[in-house]
Amino acid sequence: MKKFALAALLAAVAAPALAADPVPNVSPAMWVVKDQDTTVYLFGTFHMLDGKRDWFNDEVRTAFDASNELVMEIVMPENPAELQPLIMKHAIDQSGKPLSAKLKPEVKAKLDKELGTLGVPAAAMDKLEPWFVSMTMAAVGAGKLGLKPEHGPEKVLTAAAKEKGKPISGVETVEGQIAILDGMPEATQIAALTHTIEGMSKLSETFMPMLAAWSSGDTDALVKVMNSGLDNDPIVYKAMLTDRNAKWADWIGTRMEKPGTVFMAVGAGHLAGRDSVQDFLAKKGIKAERVKS
């Protein structure tokens, strides 16, 4: 949800609906990993929020204030123009074959209809890779529901860290995240785009339950709605979750060798369900404990 929460956005549009979110009772899930001289807090984020949820308080704020540094998935450039070369490199289809020629006629018709509803010119999408069209549609659709990256934890935490003079770093790079999607087989990208198109009419039934689960710290409900779209495709699941979670667990294991307190904020889907960061930490003999709300 960028945020491009790359994984969360693409998984969300194919997810099943759960209950609605009538009251924003916010207490997101957080874990802690400790040894004698090192503490790493693991906070699961929801990359796009509605600005109505007061999550940065109590145990989350206490953990952040106690930390010496902020670590996120990526550090977004302050100037959006810096992303343009990456978009040109990874999002534009270099084959010269338009997207419209890759889709079945009925899928193309649905795509044009949904893009029109979003106010996005279909012609502007025709030279782009399917993964980028999926991401764009999901992000624009979420925005129409009031979910925006400027309200997300990454923005809030970054501002707070800068105010306190805390170092900010990422376990991945922007280009690295983009390259994961760009590197997926074209058939996989088209399948994901097709799911996105079919799910646009039910975005509220997708994002709102996901947001409710995140807000209440209900990781069981969260994993059902956030990661279910990835479960259906082992290629996507491995690239978006398994491989990345394993690398992040390795990063934490290495960081535990250095004294200090770290506040690590990554997409909540990476901290829930099987093959989570905590699962990979456990394989390394590192225990992550849930912080009581």
Image (cartoon, rainbow, N blue to C red):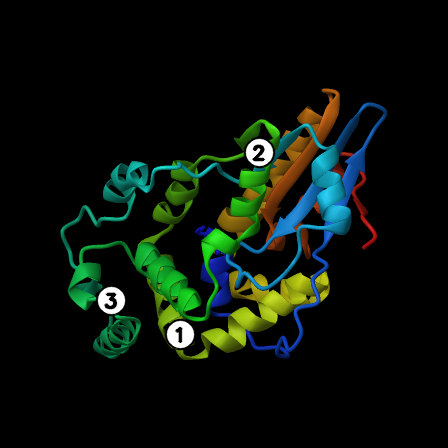
Of labels 1 and 3, earlier in sequence is 3
- Please name which of the two marks, 1 or 3, marks the residue nearer to the observer: 3
Q: Which residue is drawn at the image coordinates 55% and 75% (left, top)? A: 16
Position of 216 relative to 236 (above/below): below
Report, in whole angstroms, how far the alpha carbon at label 1 lies from the one at label 3: 14 Å
Judging by the rendered image, the residue that carries numbered circle 3 is 120
Residue at image mark 1: 200
Q: Residue furthest right?
A: 36
> On residue 163, which mark appears?
2
Q: Is residue 275 visible?
A: no
The residue located at (59%, 27%) in the rendering is 165
- Dot 2: few (<14), some (14–19), or many (≥20) neighbours within 10 Å? few
Q: Amino acid at mark 3?
A: Val
Q: Position of residue 261 (x, y in %)?
A: 73, 29
Q: CA distance from mark 3 to mark 2?
A: 37 Å
Q: Amino acid at mark 2?
A: Glu
Frontmost of labels 3 and 2 is 2
CA gap, disc 2 and disc 1: 38 Å
Do the CB atoms of the residues marked 3 and 2 lie less than 8 Å apart?
no
